């Protein structure tokens, strides 16, 4: 089942939340900073042992102070006009996050809108990539949540889900 929610991803009761991280995995701004603040310093300490994460890949960490048991961090592409493999890299973020979730027997997972903040990916284009991944994997999970920052962001996902 695909759910579309306007919420703070750090408050969701799911097995795993996905972090739109930078390649260091050591915290940053936006969703990444919020997740690190709520999880506590243990997340940064744990992630320091992972050796970073290239764009398109994903890494898993315990949730520490979060309601979610797991944090799956993935590094989305920086938008450079759409002609530099951004869509493929973004799709890899979702695919690799779902793969880690399956390997770790995770039944419910929530995603933010990866790469749409400071990385500048256009929201509708990013949502199209996300929704294709959600639809491809939804049968293997109890819940797949698109956790949106605003009602206008959620409306993009709702429109795509109903098309």
Image (tube, rainbow, N blue to C red):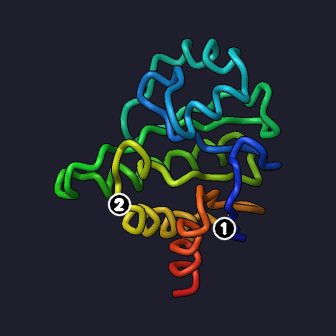
Q: Residue at x 52, y 20 (%)?
A: 26
Q: Which residue is label 1 attached to?
A: 4
- Helix, strand or loop for disc 2: loop
Q: Relative to residue 11, is residue 158 depicted above or below? A: below
Residue placed at 44% from the left, 31% from the top?
22
Foreground residue, 107 or 103? 107
Q: Quadrant of the N terminus?
A: bottom right
Residue 143 in picture, x, y percent from top left: 74, 62
Residue 151: x %, y % from top left: 61, 67
Asked whether, in this view, residue 132 is left or right of residue 13, the answer is left
* Residue at the image position 42 percent from the left and 52 percent from the top: 116
In the picture as drawn, the residue positioned furthest to the bottom comes out as 163
On the image, the x and y values in percent for residue 34 come to 63, 34
What secondary structure is found at the residue carrying circle 1?
Answer: strand
Which residue shows up at 67% across the image and 52% down it?
Answer: 110
Q: CA distance from mark 2 to mark 1?
A: 18 Å
82 left or right, relative to 133: left
Task: Give the left or right position of residue 114, taking residue 34 as reference.
Answer: left
Q: Say which mark, if any, is on residue 36.
A: none
Counting the numbered discs, the total is 2
- For disc 2, the marked residue is 122
Q: Position of residue 72 (x, y in %)?
A: 61, 38
Q: Earlier in the sequence, mark 2 or mark 1?
A: 1
> Mark 1: few, some, or many residues within 10 Å (few <14, many ≥20)?
many
The answer to which quarter of the image holds residue 11 is top right
Nearest the viewer among 114 and 131 is: 114
């Amino acid at each position: 089942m695909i759910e579309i929610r306007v919420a703070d991803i750090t408050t969701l009761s799911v097995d795993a939340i996905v972090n739109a991280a930078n390649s260091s995995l050591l915290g940053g701004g936006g969703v990444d900073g919020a997740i690190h603040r709520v999880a506590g310093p243990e997340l940064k300490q744990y992630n320091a042992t992972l050796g970073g994460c290239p764009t398109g890949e994903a890494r898993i960490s315990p949730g520490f102070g979060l309601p979610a048991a797991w944090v799956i961090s993935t590094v989305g592409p920086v938008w450079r006009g759409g002609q530099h493999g951004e869509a493929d890299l973004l799709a890899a973020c979702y695919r690799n996050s779902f793969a880690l979730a399956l390997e770790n027997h995770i039944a419910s997972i929530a995603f933010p809108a990866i790469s749409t903040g400071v990385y500048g990916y256009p929201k509708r284009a990013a949502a199209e990539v996300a929704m294709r991944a959600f639809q491809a994997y939804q049968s293997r999970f109890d819940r797949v949540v698109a956790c949106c920052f605003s009602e206008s962001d959620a409306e993009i996902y709702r429109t795509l889900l109903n098309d």
